[in-house]
Image (tube, rainbow, N blue to C red):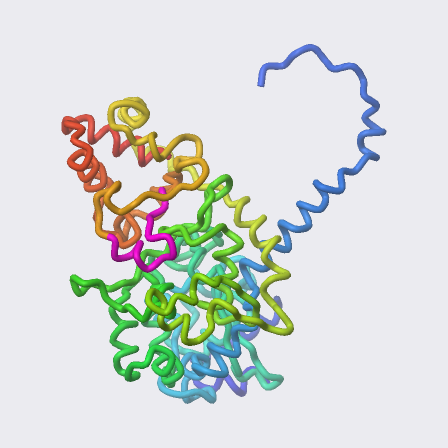
Amino acid sequence: MRAEWLGGLAGASLAVLTVGFAACGAAGPPRAAASPPAREREKDPAVEGVERRLAEGRETFRFDTFGDEAFWGDTLRLHEAIAGAAHGGVGPGVSPRTALAVGLKVDLDALPPQVVQALKGGKVDLDDPATTLLLLQQDAVVGVTGRFDAGGALRSIGIQCALCHSRVDDALAPGVGHRLDGWPNQDLDVGKIVSLSPDLSPVARLLGVPEDTVREVLASWGPGRFDAALFLDGKAFRPDGKTAATLIPPAFGLAGVNLHTFTGWGSVPYWNAFVAVLEMHGQGSFTDPRLDDATKFPVAAANGFGHVRADPDLVAPKLADLQLYQLALEAPRPPEGSFDAAAADRGAELFAGDAKCARCHAPPLFTDAGWNTHAPDEIGIDDFQSSRSPDGRYRTTPLRGLWTHTRRGFYHDGRFASLDDVVAHYDRLLGLGLTDAQRADLVEYLKSL
């Protein structure tokens, strides 16, 4: 049956794929005996519960759509553009090569061994949308779930947290590897993917603009960016004409960090609920009366986004375990040899001392303990993005794992192209008078975190 609907897939590739997918401290004196057998019999319910909940949280992070197929599939009909006219959809369809080009990733561990070998041997047709459909059937496209009918036709599609906040290690090929949960997908072109929809009129009606304007806005985002505030205030561009979209942030290294986003907003479970309901358009409840402010959030206020109720609620029951898993995602250590260790040691002294970095980015969290936000003038930048948040402030961003997201620049909007530019900015703002060598040492320290 599957071979029938795959129709146009190249013969050799089809044979390989269908067969492959079908197959598939210093030691002290010894302690007094504490009855090890008794200890083994004792079970800590809290520890056992955490292990179970971590597994549930990971499942939610990676695979739960919260019922958002109703939006991405039923409303925007995105699945039709992915399938293509040859497979019951519209247009040319989305091939694996196209999917990888817009930043989608393939989970190597979800692929049967035969398919992995075929990919290694170049025997898989990466230019046929039918191959994309097979990958979706295997849950191998990170952050995307396809819903198929009994005949193998794609009938809807949903997205997960992992779409924006996971990458792969490129173990097999660029974009194909083992999952790296929590890493920001700097390649993901959300705007271009959404623009594949054959019908963006629901978004146009929400924002009160022509559909062509919606597509223009989506095209302005570019890779690694998303505008979470667009559906709140309708502001698509900064006063200087640049996109209002911000960089996709990491979802790792947040244990002990009070606020989740660049501009504060709220805690990890707050933001997860916000995104699941208002951005992913999942079926869930969400409350924030701050969104009733029609002056600051005209789109949100007009549509009651601060008081969303759903029955059943597919989001709230998942928030606790999702938070637990997310807080367990540690910032990855930089690769060996990726920074100058001696220079980093000197930079650490500067960071804690004359450079004044630790006044806000206090180790070991590398953010403020407590209410970790600052006014725009404290950090020497404009207030455009902070003014789109309830408190009008910027969060002190945790610094661990900076090396994982250097390609799109730094700060919420990537305004500083390099860490050198960030250090130079604060040198000027605070009048530090650092030498070139000191600035270089600080950069090496930041790369070491």
In-image side of 216 versus 193 (left or right): left
In-image side of 207 versus 138 (left or right): left
Residue at image point 51% right, 41% down: 255
Q: Nearer the viewer, residue 336 or 298?
A: 298
| Placement of 125 over or under 58, stated as above or below | below
Q: In which quarter of the image is the N terminus?
A: bottom right
The quadrant in which residue 363 appears is top left
- Can you name the residue that lies furthest to the top here? 29
In-image side of 41 versus 194 (left or right): right
Residue 434, image x, y percentages: 17, 27
Question: In terms of secondary structure, what is the magenta stretch mainly?
Answer: loop
The quadrant in which residue 365 appears is top left
Residue at image point 27% right, 24% down: 350
Q: In which quarter of the image is the C terminus?
A: top left
Residue 316 in sight in this render: yes
In-image side of 300 versus 38 (left or right): left
Residue at image point 14% right, 26% down: 435
| Placement of 394 over or under 273, stated as above or below | above
Residue at image point 61% right, 68% down: 314
| Placement of 363 over or under 425, stated as above or below | above
Residue 263, image x, y percentages: 36, 52
Q: Tell me which segment is drawn in magenta.
A: 383-396
Residue 102 in sight in this render: no
Residue 411, image x, y percentages: 28, 48
Q: Which of 98 and 366 is in front in this view?
A: 366
| Numbered marks: total | 0
The quadrant in which residue 82 appears is bottom left
Find out whether residue 104 is within the magenta segment: no
Residue 345, image x, y percentages: 31, 23
| Placement of 208 over or under 218, stated as above or below | below
Find out whether residue 386 is within the magenta segment: yes
Q: Which of 152 and 219 is in front in this view?
A: 219
